[in-house]
Image (cartoon, helix red, strand yellow):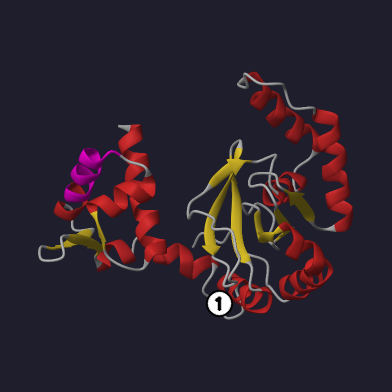
Amino acid sequence: MVKSAGRVLEIFEFFAHRHAPATVTEVAAALGFPLSSTSVLLKSLLSLGYLEYEPRARDYQPTIRFAVLGTWIFDRFFAEEGGIPRLMDELQAETGETIVLAMQHGEYVDYIRILQSIRPVRFHIKPGSRRPIFLPAAGKVLLAQQSDAEVARLLRRINAGRGAVPLAVAPLLAELAQIRVQGHARSEGAVVPDTMMLSMALPVTEGHRPLAVAVSGPLARMRRSRGGILRLMREKIATLRPLSTDRR
């Protein structure tokens, strides 16, 4: 049941980023699902009114019911003029690189919105990607918003479940201290070889779930433009109003 629920959400994320209809085969190939179970899930979503089916093209696409699922959350947090979507659009337009909005999910960092690079040479980040939180710059920025005691507890939990060499706590805490001082994190080849990610925290009010924005691209190109990208990120983020936890 949990596995099926997770696959339904991955299908939603697939269509949210695809912006076009897709056949069963295309959905299964993109998400790595078995063809038979993908067909069953799509037919279930069709019967519930979240998808519609075009018999001639044999493809599915979301209905308006799918579109309005999270609009109230988007309106609360992201719809104001000069908000996060605009920040991401401007960062992409001025850098040409991949822009990522990230938040923590337990031991992982989730890439909840991605603008793919518009450069001819680029690395594609799959929408809805999830990474171990201690690897990419975006994850480290989110960890830096926490106390050392909280981070140490999380790392002990991660180490308890690892079959590999345990993570060293002290070096990561030292790196997070430096991130807090300099206001940004950098990772090189942390997940994909020959790439760099630069990340900064977004302003939120007390009690709001921390968010981070990141710029990612080929290592050599990012090294050449790192200083300019960091200045641009600081300037753009400084114009944002802190996201509120208002639940009215």
> Does the segment drawn in magenta span residue 38?
yes
Image quadrant where residue 4 sits: top left
Indicate left or right for 32 with 242 as reference.
left
The residue shown at (14%, 52%) is 47
Residue named by callout 1: 80
The residue shown at (78%, 53%) is 185
Foreground pick, 189 / 176: 189
The relative height of residue 205 versus residue 168 in the rendered view (above or below) is below
Q: Residue furthest left?
A: 55
Indicate left or right for 178 with 243 as reference.
right
Q: Residue furthest bottom?
A: 81
The relative height of residue 239 versus residue 145 in the rendered view (above or below) is below
Tell me if mark 1 has few (under 14), some (14-19) or many (20+) residues whose alpha carbon lies within 10 angstroms of its own: some
Q: Which residues are magenta?
A: 34-43
Q: Secondary structure at mark 1?
A: loop
Foreground pick, 126 / 242: 126
- Measuring from the top left, give residue 216's x and y in whole percent: 66, 60
The relative height of residue 117 versus residue 149 in the rendered view (above or below) is below
- Measuring from the top left, give residue 64's x and y in whole percent: 26, 68
- Measuring from the top left, give residue 8's x and y in whole percent: 32, 46
- Measuring from the top left, give residue 97's x and y in whole percent: 64, 68
The residue shown at (19%, 43%) is 40
The residue shown at (24%, 42%) is 35
Foreground pick, 63 / 231: 231
* Residue 244 seen by the camera: no
